[in-house]
Amino acid sequence: MYKVCVLAVFLVSLTLSTTAQAAKVFVAKYENQAKYTAYEVKYENQANCKVYKVPYENQAGLGKWFFVKYENQADMTLYWVKYENQAKLKVFFVKYENQADCLL
């Protein structure tokens, strides 16, 4: 019984971790179509989400975003707002992969 419980917990955590780390992003045309609102900040210390853009879909992960063309390919949708105070996410795009730090 103990082994079955441990195996079940492991499988559930494995499933949740892969979906939580996926970061294929679709930029919505309208705010009501997006799950998150985002604003690109000028400086790293202003950001609550530091993102590295990856060139290939299979590289997407925690803090590593791949922008897709179609909404049905995305794990997350966002809308870029005009003013910082309208945004839930303050995004800064980093130069290097190891600087990425975003829990979405």
Image: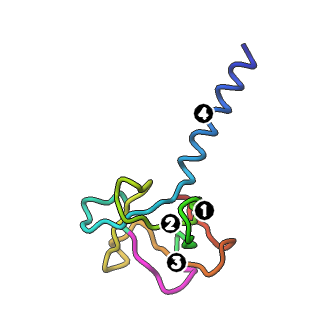
Q: Is residue 75 above or below residue 98?
A: above
Q: Nearer the viewer, mark 2 or mark 3?
A: 2
Q: What secondary structure is found at the residue carrying circle 1? A: helix
Using residue 90 as the reference point, say whether residue 87 is left or right of it: left
- Is residue 28 shown in magenta? no
Q: What secondary structure is found at the residue carrying circle 4? A: helix
Check contact, mark 1 vs mark 2: CB within 8 A: yes
Mark closest to the chain's N terminus, 4 or 3: 4
Q: Residues within 10 Å of mark 2 (few under 14, many from 20)?
A: many
Residue 80 image point, x, y percent = 35, 73
Q: Nearer the viewer, mark 4 or mark 1?
A: 1
Mark closest to the chain's N terminus, 4 or 2: 4
Q: Amino acid under label 4?
A: Val
The coloring applied to the image is rainbow
Whole-number angstrom distance, CA of label 4 to CA of label 1: 22 Å
- Residue at image position (46%, 73%) is 90
Q: Is residue 67 visible?
A: yes
- Is residue 42 shown in magenta? yes
Residue to which mark 4 is pinned: 12
Q: Is residue 50 visible?
A: no
Residue to which mark 3 is pinned: 92
Mark closest to the chain's N terminus, 4 or 1: 4
Residue 7 image point, x, y percent = 70, 26
Q: Amino acid under label 1?
A: Gln
The quadrant where residue 56 appears: bottom right
Using residue 59 as the reference point, say whether residue 25 is left or right of it: left
Give the magenta range: 38-46
Residue 16 image point, x, y percent = 57, 41
Residue projecting furthest to the top: 1
